[in-house]
Amino acid sequence: MTEQYEVIVIGGGAAGLSAALVLGRARRHTLVVDAGEPRNAPAAHIQGFLSRDGMPPAEFLAVGREEIARYGVEVVRGRAVDVTRNDDGGSFTVTLADGRAVRARRLVVATGLKDELPAVPGVAERFGRDVLHCPYCHGWEVRDQPFGVLATTPMSVHQALMVSQWSKDVTLFLHEVAEGDLSDDDLRRLVAAGVSVVPGVVADLVVEDDHLTGVRLADGSTHARSVLFTAPRPLPRTGLLEKLGADLDETPFGAYPVIDPTGRTTVPGVWAVGNAMGFSEQVVNAASSGYRAGATINGDLLMTDLDAATPR
């Protein structure tokens, strides 16, 4: 027999748990389906989240699961592999990888995204340690060290300029970007920020005693660096939204669902939150988006039921 809920939240990160917390406190029968793949798993700590600054990501999620359990929210470990709108038009069935099927009147898609890192030996292994992507997440902890920026697109210039706020020793390795792709404004700003520019393909990273010590180019030259910033390619997990026919908006950073300010998608009854709705959501912003969606869904269910009870 298919289990029935009012709301199913697909994804147990900051956004999904925040939505579930609001819904649980609103006395909504809610299920969280958690595949256990948080985007920030490689990071040692969450930073920039008031009252949670410095907390390990796993601890943050564990606290969140404890909090939602107080309000009767259920959590199941598993992966949602399929979702369909039921014939009644007002509910959905979610199928898990183990074959279990669950049903709900509303869905919150909080499946996040995956970071595709540059294919440079050593980058993936050190990501979240001394290979980083977000200065607001990690800049303070590595301040004043020699930074490198591994360019993957001309927009990497912006990243190099930004990280110069945390270190005055910054080198931009052009890697996949041709010198001719840099605009006059790019070059002017790089000079003003004191950022050095090194052309050529990066071959690998130099690591000694489990610490990054340099960046090696294809020509064999090595540049001493303690920290390397790069911009991964975001791969949004939108498969379930696509199955439901949600409209997606193509951006330079992937395709994301078309939503209103509450996260409501173009599919009635379906919301997207966190990195499932945009690539740059920090943990604090992801949690905020979940809260907003949860409150909106509660009101939506309430008005739907009241209208059904009092036909016009």
Image: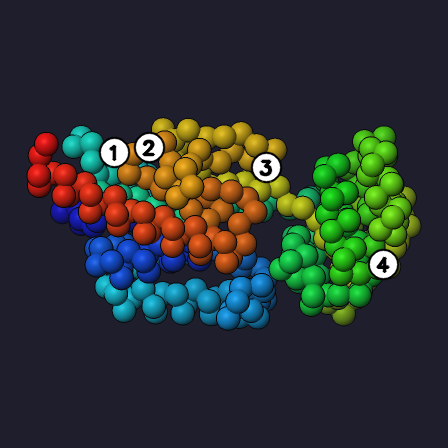
Q: State the residue lying farthest toward the front.
A: 312
Instruction: Check if mark 2's residue and mark 1's residue have beta carbons within 8 Å.
Output: yes
Instruction: Check if mark 2's residue and mark 3's residue have beta carbons within 8 Å.
Output: no
**Image side of residue 198 versus residue 56, left or right:** right
Residue marked by disc 2: 267
Instruction: Check if mark 3's residue and mark 4's residue have beta carbons within 8 Å.
Output: no
Question: In this rendering, does residue 57 appear at all?
Answer: yes
Residue marked by disc 4: 169
Give the distance between the C-alpha atoms of the residues marked 2 and 3, in whole angstroms: 22 Å
Secondary structure found at label 4: loop
Residue marked by disc 3: 253
Q: Earlier in the sequence, mark 3 or mark 4?
A: 4
Q: Few, some or many C-alpha atoms within 10 Å of disc 1 (few <14, some 14-19, many ≥20)?
A: some
Q: Earlier in the sequence, mark 2 or mark 4?
A: 4
Amino acid type, label 1: Arg
The quarter in which the C terminus is drawn is top left
Q: Which mark is residue 85?
A: 1
**Image side of residue 250 versus residue 219, left or right:** left
Q: Closer to the camera: disc 2 or disc 1?
A: 2
Instruction: Check if mark 1's residue and mark 3's residue have beta carbons within 8 Å.
Output: no
Residue located at (69% from left, 61% from top)? 139
Give the distance between the C-alpha atoms of the residues marked 3 and 4, in whole angstroms: 28 Å
Secondary structure found at label 3: loop
Instruction: Check if mark 2's residue and mark 4's residue have beta carbons within 8 Å.
Output: no
